Image (cartoon, rainbow, N blue to C red):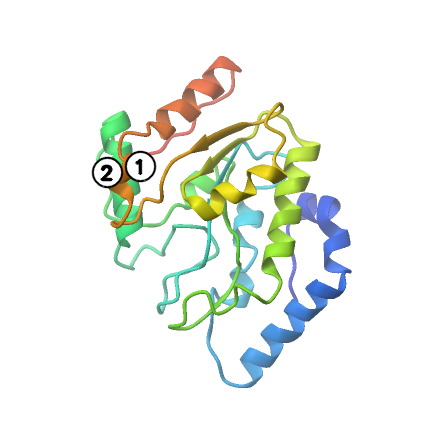
Amino acid sequence: MSLKIEKSWEKVIWEEFEKPYFKDIKSFLVQEIESGEIIYPNPKNIFHAFDLTPFDNLKVVILGQDPYHGPGQAHGLSFSVLDWVKVPPSLKNIYKEIHQDLWYPIPETGNLTSWAEQWVLMLNAFLTVRKASPASHSKIGWNHFTDAVIKKISEEKEGVIFLLWWAFAQTKKELINSSKHHILEAPHPSPFSAYKWFFGCGHFSKVNEILKERWEKEIDWTI
């Protein structure tokens, strides 16, 4: 099973691919597929977020947890689904907050590729999941890999804006040097917690204010 990642990422995290835990991840995924299990996203899209947002260019990190576990949903970007898939509830709430914050119209598609192409890394903590089984791959070692990714961003870049929208994501603060980077926190945008200050957090305008202060191009949050 071949897992390839974009070249600028490969330069900074190649050591992770040589570690025993990553070899265990690869073996586990092969066993899942050979036993007839369906995993999401499609193996060719496991590193899709990295392919769209090279290490050298990234400005913002949005951290999710698990890929969607329904047919055709996950394509390697946190919170994002393919064009023909119904927009999930959490993403609907993200759109509502953008509408409140910036008055952009609420889109009909849940495909966030355009954000990734503006150097927003749409990173899930766990990069695969078994069909219809949420968190089924949460203990196979992906956390070691994505923690290493966050550490590398913190160590080797400056001024990255991290959006940490829930308790699990906020545990990753210890991996981030807050004197070099910006950390914006809010509750999860799910229907169960969005009303606990996710709505009104203003993170999308705040990201652009930070970028504008640095004379950098702002993110176009329209879809």
Q: Nearer the viewer, residue 8 or 159?
A: 159
Q: Secondary structure at mark 1?
A: helix
Locate residue 131, reporting x and y percent: 41, 73
Which amino acid, mark 2?
Lys
Residue 198: assigned label: 1
Q: Position of residue 140 (x, y in %)?
A: 59, 67
Position of residue 18 relative to residue 131, above or below, is above
Q: Secondary structure at mark 2?
A: helix
Q: Nearer the viewer, residue 179 or 115?
A: 179
Question: Percent from the top left, x then y, of residue 212?
Answer: 46, 16
Q: Left or right: 144 with respect to 46?
A: right
Q: Which residue is mark 2?
A: 96
Q: Where residue 171 appears, x then y in whole percent?
A: 52, 44
| The quarter of the displayed image where residue 88 is located | bottom left
Residue at the image position 57 percent from the left and 55 percent from the top: 47
Residue type indicated by callout 1? Phe
Q: Quadrant of the C terminus?
A: top left
| Residue at image coords 66%, 48% | 148
Q: Which residue corresponds to the image point at 66% horizontal and 30% vertical from the top-left?
A: 157
